[in-house]
Structures are given as structure tokens and as C-alpha cells.
Image (spheres, helix red, strand yellow):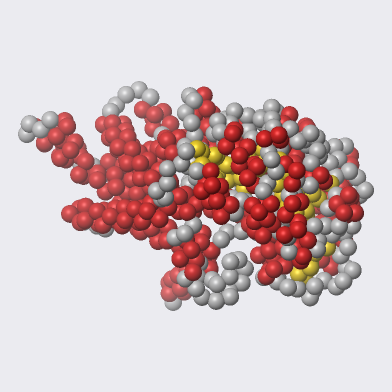
Amino acid sequence: MKKNNLKIISKVYSALIYFILYIPIIILVIFSFNQSKLNATWTGFTFKWYQKLLTNSGLLVSVKNSLIIAFVSSIVSVMIGTLTAVGIYKSKFKGKSIVDGMLYIPIVIPEIVLGIALLAFFSLTKISSGILTLIIAHITFSISYVVVVVRARLDGFDKSIEEAAMDLGATPFQTFMKITLPSIMPGVIAGGLLAFTLSIDDVIISFFVAGPSSMTFPLKVFNMVKFGVSPEINALSTVLIILTVAVVIVAEKIRSNNIKSKNIKRVLASLMSFIFIFTLGVWKASSKAVHYEGELNIFNWSDYIPQPVIEEFERRYNIKVNYSSYGSNEEMLAKMMAGGNGYDVVVAADYMVDIMRKQDMLEVIDTNNLNNWSNIGSEFKNLYFDKENKHSVPYMRSEAIIVVDSTKIKDGEIKDFNDLWKEKFKDSIVMMDDPRGVIGMTLKTLNYDFNETDVNKLNEAKVKLKKLQVNIRAYDSDNSKAMLISREVPIGVAWSAEAGFAMAENKDLRAIIPGEGLFLQQDNFVIPKGSKNSKEAELFLNYVLESDVSIEFTKAYPYTNCNEATYPMTPKEILESPLSFPPKEELEKGDYLMDIGDAVKYYDLIWSEIKN
């Protein structure tokens, strides 16, 4: 009786573990068929996102790059890894244990450390970031996995068979090809499939070594969170999940000898044929038979320039645009400072322009070459971070505001940031995940400067911010709209874009401009020092300043467009929206993030203590 109970408990426990592991994937697959563009509520069944996937050239190009890199790096890794495993297995020399241990370094070392090291190496050796650097990097971390898998197969290998072959006159090469390799082939194939899977899933290392024209699919997905993951991503992820699962299952079957040796080639050939056909289909769908006369490399938030705008620029000027994306201003700066090169136009926030300008990382922009420079509103020019606009061209401005569910929060209950500390709002807030912004807001509730550097005042803000933690359900700058749309929380502190997307889906949400003042941030176009296509960059900047082009930004993103020439053609509801165009008196009370020098370490310490 006890044994039966234990069996039942173990089965229930196993089922629960698998449910927790796979429910996110199941939800992703389900929402790939959702009618709504947002992954917050189910609105109906559709196949349209799979159809749109075929026309999303940027996404398909990233998949094509990932498959090319995975194929090449896997093949090279298998060749080097197999020979290394056999060589170490057969050889006896001093320090063998040390060599064995060194093979595990790429496996155990943090990916971000390996990524920075590889970026520094490529920078020193003057190898331009691109497909080649990605392949080399993926080979670097894949070889160890192949060696480990093949070595495990060799541990059960009968050496007497090799000796018998040698006694019968076979050469070492013939013995390896006819005896050793066939015997360890399941391990070789399993190692290769594992290397393929690791390569196609990599994000961290790829971010550091990828170039302007070598965006991979995981990077594309990872960086699309600024405006939420689109349903096309869910659709393509579903297809790739099926592909990855097939690869892993075959690898495990081969590794555990569940597939007979005579059937290995047949199974492997079928799998490789499927992968090849899939890759060919993606290649055809993403390729355009166009010969371009020039090239422009853009580094920006994901999908922060509408695709039709880019396509029209390519058509009009016959210049190919390579669009790469990052997940934060700090990520962008880290890559640029660590040796990332090849970019011609970068979008940077106000404080980041200030930092890059002081580090002499930006080219001077001759506004005389920009015929449409006068379209930029005067309120967006000559700000603290670039007082003469020698290094930047204003793009869009955003504000951090409070969003509340009017069915749960009464009018007047929340008027400013200070009201968020009320006990009645326990576990009710989704807060933007921005250390400088959140600490700055807390400082404002204490009547201190938003960019305060005094340690005593910062400690006072820390004490107050700790008291707010019981009211915060989650920190999320990337997808707070999902929690607001689904009514998971009634209060949010979010960027105006997140608030706008949420309010469009949930009509009960309303925006509140905090009494202490807005947290403002202006994004700007800059040209990095050493740009190889500076003329094309200036041509692009002048192009996006055209009112007919810039209005597309207003339609796509609920931010404040810095191009005032678009205002006559901007819909009235947008011009009157406090999200896109806050009242002038509120803007005058607002604050921008500023470069605070070494004082930033105090903010980092406070944030670490708060989050932990």
C-alpha cells in the first residue's frame, strides 16, 4: 500500500515539475494563434501571424543568420571537438588532467565574460564584427560540449578492436575511419546536434560579437521587448521550438543507443533534409534580388523605426539599411566602448548622448547638410546634454507617468508619486525597472533634486523607497502594459508608450501626471566616431526629418515627436493626449536624467539593496 502511495506521489510530483517547466512554452504556442497583437488577453483564433511572418523581412533575415551560423559552427566544432577528444583519450602526457580541466572553462565561465573577452580579441585583431566573428565565437564555446559528449562515448570503447585491426595491417588512419569513428559516431552526432542547439539559442555572447548586418534571431527577440513581443515572434518561435525539440530528441536517442547503428544515417539524413529545406525556405523568403550602391548601419531599440520608413529610404536612395538593436542604453554603451564598431547611426537617450560626447565617441553633425533641420521644434534643441546640437538630432521624447484602473482606483486617490506609499495599495503596483528614474522620483517626493548626489539625501530616499516595496507587485519597464491590460494590477508607473498601448486595449485605464513633475527622456540620433558611411548617415537623418516621413513615427509610437512640422497632420486626439503632448506647465516641472559622474555608484548600491 505504501509503495503504491509513493508511486502516485512521485508521478504527481513529476507531472507538476514538467507542468511548471513547459507551461510558458505552451502559452507561447497558444498565443501565436491569438487575434490580438498583445499577449495579455485571448481575443480569438487566427493564422494571420503565421502569414505575416512570411513578409517580415527583418525577422526572417535574423533567422537566416542564426541558421547559417549554427550550421557552420556546428560542423567545425564537431571536427575539432572529435579529434581533440580522441587525441586526449589516446595520449598520455604530463599535465593531462590540467588540459582536461581547461576544456570545461568555456562551459562554466559566465557568458558575459566570454562575450566581452571575445569582443576585445576581435577589436585587437581588427576583425570586423559580423557573421565571421559570430561563427568563431560559437565555435569557441561549442567545442567543449562536443569534446565532453564524445569523451563520454569513448569511455566505453573497446581498444582491443583497434589493436586487432592494426595487427591485420590497417594503418592508423584506416583504423580511425573504419573502426574508431563508426563506433563513436552516436556521440559525434549527439555532440553536433547539441552544438547546433546551443548556437541557435545563444544571446549573450552573440550580442557582443554581432555586427551591423549579422543580427541573429535570439537577439532580435530579446531586444523587441521595448514595444512588446509581436505575435510574429510567437509564430516563428513555435516553428523553431518544433525544430529544436526534434534535434534534441534525435540527439538523445542516438546518445542512448535507442536508434540502431544502421538506422542512424537514415534518421540523420531525414533530420538534416528537414533543416535544410526549412533554411532554404527562410533564405528565399528573406532575400531580395536588389543591388544596392551604398550601405547604412543603424543601432537602435528594436522596431523603433517603422519598417516602411526604412524600405522607402532603401528604394529612394538605393542604400541598404542594416538594422541592429539593443535592450538598453547601457548595453549599447558597453558594446561601443568595448570595441563594437561599424555603426553609422545610433539612437541614444539624452544622458547617454552627454556621456558619449564627453568620451569623444561622437562625430560632429553639420546641420547645414540637413535641409529639414528647421522642422525640429525649438523646445527639443540646445538641451543640457548637447547645448549647440553639434552631436545629436532630436527624435522622440517620452515621459514616465502614473496609470490607474478607474474601476478600482477612485478619482483623487492618486495625484502624485507620494500617494503610491498609501497602505491600501499593497501589492498593487507595477513599477518601471529603472534605478535612476525610480530613485529620482523618490527624491522628488522628499523635495530633493531628481539627480541628487548628496549621500545623506540618497540614504533618506533609500529608507523611504524600502517602505514602498510592500506595494510593488513587480518591476517591469518592458511589458508593464500586459499587467495593466489584464487587470493584474490597478496601478502602474510606466513610460508613455507603454501607457498608451495599455489604454488602447483597456478603456478603463487613465493617465495621471504626477504632481512632483514628469520624468522626461529624449531619444536622439547620433553618428558614432569613425563612421564609414557618414554621408549616408546624414542623408538618412535629413530623410527622417521630412514631415511626410516623420509623421509615420507619430502613428507608430505614442511618444512626443520632436518634428513640429508633423503637427498640422497629426490627429487631434494625439495632439490633445497628455501621453504624447503633456501640458507646457507640466513639462517645465519635469526632469531629465543627467550624467552624475561617480555618484552613480550610490544609485547602483541603493538599487541592489532595494531589489534584493
The residue under the point 88% across, 63% down is 415
* In-front residue for pair 47/185: 47
The residue under the point 42% across, 52% down is 286
* In-front residue for pair 94/174: 174
The residue under the point 51% across, 38% down is 295
Q: Is residue 195 left or right of residue 153?
A: right
* In-front residue for pair 406/342: 342
From the top left corner, tell me how far across and down residue 571 is, in percent: 73, 64
Q: Is residue 135 left or right of residue 398?
A: left
The residue under the point 26% across, 48% down is 186
Identify the image quadrant of residue 277. bottom left
* In-front residue for pair 84/562: 562
Q: Is residue 40 left or right of residue 61?
A: right
Whether residue 396 is situated above or below residue 228 in the rendered picture: above
- In the rendered image, is residue 491 in sight? no
Whether residue 497 is situated above or below residue 148 in the rendered picture: below
- In the rendered image, is residue 525 in sight? yes
* Quadrant of the snapshot with the N terminus: bottom left
